[in-house]
Image (tube, helix red, strand yellow):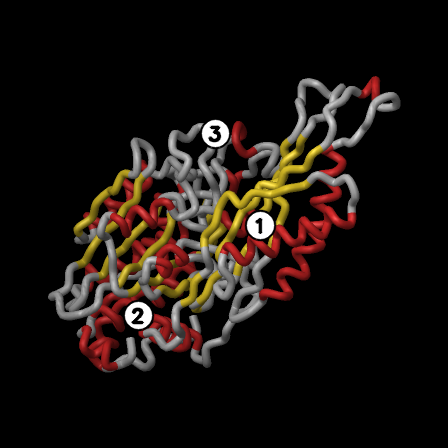
Amino acid sequence: MTADGLAGLDERRRSWALDAARHISTDRLRELITGLVNIPSPTGDEGPLAAHIAGTLRTAGCHAAVQPLDDRQANAWGRLTGDGTGPDLMLYAPIDTLTVGEESEDVPWIGPELREDMRPAATVYDDLVTGLGASNPKGHAACVMMAVEAISLAGVPLAGDLVAAFGAGGMPTNARPVGTRLNTGQGAGCSFLLEQGVWTDYAVIAKPGWTVSWDEVGLVWFEVTVGGIHTYAGSRHRLPYDNAIARAGEVAAYLEKWFEGYAERHTSGTVAPQGIVSSIRGGWPRMAAVTPAVCTLMVDLRISPDITPMRAKREFMDALAALRAASPGLDVRAEMVLAIPGTRTPRESWIHRSATAAWEALEGREYEVIPGNSGATDANILRGRGIPTVRVGMPKVAEAPFEIDFARGMNTVSLRAMEKLTRHLVRTAVDTVTRSRDELEGAGA
């Protein structure tokens, strides 16, 4: 670690942050992260993990609760109460994993088999811990737990409340086939948390990337329907033939190229919104002898905070119109089926300035902006409801005794990086919830 992360704090806050930092250890972080990884929490089934987190927070001296969304899905939150004179701060992390950790739902889409890291079972390799979601999101959730636990054990005198919140349904997914509610992902837990009154003046979301992000892409999803003719292989040479599957391939290739220009047009701030064709559906797998009348594609199109979902929809529809004009006879249409706007927190906001100061204190150098981001998180839910929010997290592990691909990056976390992020969260929290509201308002909060 390059610095203690306390430079720039006044004497009192430096002392409080130092007292809290004494309770941060790699042994405790290892214990926390293995505990989280070993409890499966795919989107829609976070209840058992939420109960575990709430129990751990209570043991650390927090008032904590499980907040059910239904009989299987739940948030968890805890609160350290201040004297009421200061602002309230939320340290937030989602807790659901992108994949499930079971062959029946993940294979073959994730690969031919589930590797060790793709299962909800922690394995320790010296500084590294692997297992489903070990870095994203569970390593970040463990850092939030550790930060609040350290501040509680240190007895830091708080002016505002410090809230630790852990949201279900934070991954970009709709309900799994076994779900009973359609809205189990896409920030459903975070939205419910706020609707039920767990609200603060500021928020820090812990998600990947060793930076302080003040803006973030949103996303719109489209279901693209490509038409064709339902016919029979034995009659291809005798009857009109227009294969919707082949046509869908043409549409997918066109869109994959169009996404490149779209990203260039809409890159601004720290974001470079991308797009992908993510899935294809059409035909009867049991009946290879016939073609379907339609084939559908799913598209994820990321949007910058500078454009609305409706503007993105019209631009996408114009792209399809141009394709139809260039391809006589092509039947392609689309419906927008999901829309979450991109958001931005003013850089002069207190929480951005405090989190940036903590980053600089830990790095011992001026803050470095990382551009070109296209990841979306529950920060959009928090900001969209009016809570100034920044995103701070860990870099993906780069050196390991195994190759780091996308899944390994999600499923591998460094304890040293966890300690660094935890120190950042502690410093930012102490710098915020030990001040009066008048003080922050006077500072241009």
Placement of 411 over or under 15, stated as above or below: above
Measured as percent of width and height from the top left, residue 413 is found at: 47, 53
Amino acid of disc 2: Arg
Viewer-nearest residue: 186 or 111: 186
Q: Could you give the CA–CA distance between mark 2 and mark 3, rounded to whole angstroms?
A: 42 Å
Circle 2 sits on which residue? 427
Mark closer to the chain start, 1 or 3? 3
Displayed quadrant of residue 244: top right
Q: Quadrant of the C terminus?
A: bottom left
Residue 270 in sight here: yes
Circle 3 sits on which residue? 177
Q: In which quarter of the image is the N terminus?
A: bottom left
Displayed quadrant of residue 390: bottom left
Mark 3 falls on what kind of element? loop
Circle 1 sits on which residue? 406
Q: Which residue is drawn at 66% across and 22% down?
A: 284
Is residue 75 shown left or right of residue 159? right
Mark 2 falls on what kind of element? helix
Q: Could you give the CA–CA distance between mark 1 and mark 3, rounded to whole angstroms?
A: 24 Å
Placement of 214 over or under 278, stated as above or below: below
Q: Nearer the viewer, mark 1 or mark 3?
A: 3
Amino acid of disc 1: Phe
Amino acid of disc 3: Pro
Is residue 308 shown left or right of residue 315? left
Displayed quadrant of residue 147: bottom left
Placement of 398 over or under 56, stated as above or below: below
Mark 1 falls on what kind of element? helix
Q: Which residue occupies the extreme left position in the image?
A: 83
